[in-house]
Image (cartoon, grey):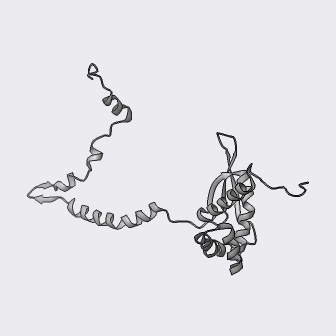
Amino acid sequence: MRHAKKRLQLGRFTSWHEATIRSLARNIILNQSIKTTLSRAKASRQMIEKLISLARENTLFARRQAQKVLGEHRIVSLLFNDIGPRFSKRASGFTRIISLGKRRGDDAEMVIFELTEIKKKETKKAKSASKEEKPKAALDKEEVIEAKPVKEGDEEKKPESAKKDIPEKEKKPQKKFIGGIRSIFKKKSDSR
């Protein structure tokens, strides 16, 4: 008899079930927030809570236990060096589940499963924007210098570079999608 052996099986064989939970644990450590189903989030919550508790201890034995579950040195070091110290003051409640509603295809309850204390990551756009700010500032200075009108007698003339500030893409309106298709399939009799 299966007394007191209840668990969320997720409709999988044991090895497949364990692999699913380990995969969710790896992804939550790497991304700090994932979108998944409610049953998967509830099934993997216990393992993730245990891993973060191990990371709070930060001993060699704890690292080896986490290595057994996660299987990748990079993820283990991220867990112990970044996530563990973040939760050092917290006794429990390392994850939260936020409901999103039902999935359209199979009506499964979708959730956002995330760590309670998320470290803000600098996105690639923000990094590239900070790198591009310096050249833009230099270009702005050049445009300001060139855009000043030159006085010749009583008349003011603007330099030609000020006229050429507008890129060619902005001058010509882009063809709409339907218009582009019409030009491809245009018949000889349709001369509009």
- In terms of image quadrants, where is residue 185? top left
Q: Residue at x 49, y 62 (%)?
A: 123
On screen, residue 135 versus residue 160, left or right, reads: right
Quadrant containing the N terminus in the rendered view: bottom right
In this rendering, is residue 10 above or below 105?
Answer: below
Percent from the top left, x then y, of residue 59?
69, 80
Q: Above or below — where is 186 with respect to 73?
A: above
- Which residue shows up at 74% across the image and 52% down it? 13
Residue found at the far left of this picture: 153
The x and y percentages for residue 80 are 64, 75
What percent of the width, then of the height, locates residue 88? Answer: 69, 76
Residue 91 visible? The answer is yes
Above or below, comparing residue 57 to residue 46 in the picture: below
For residue 44, side relative to residue 131 (left or right): right
Left or right of 150 on screen, residue 31: right
Q: Residue furthest top?
A: 189
24 or 90: nearer the eye? 24
| Corner quadrant of residue 183 | top left
Quadrant for the C terminus in the image:
top left
Q: Position of residue 119 (x, y in %)?
A: 59, 67
Q: Is residue 123 positioned above or below 84 on the image?
A: above
Question: In front: 136, or 18?
Answer: 18
| Residue 88 seen anywhere in this rendered image of the structure | no
Where residue 177 sits, quadrant-wise, is top left
Looking at the rendered structure, the number of numbered marks drawn on it comes to: 0
**Residue at the image position 73 percent from the left and 61 percent from the top:** 45
Residue in the picture at 60% in, 72% down: 73
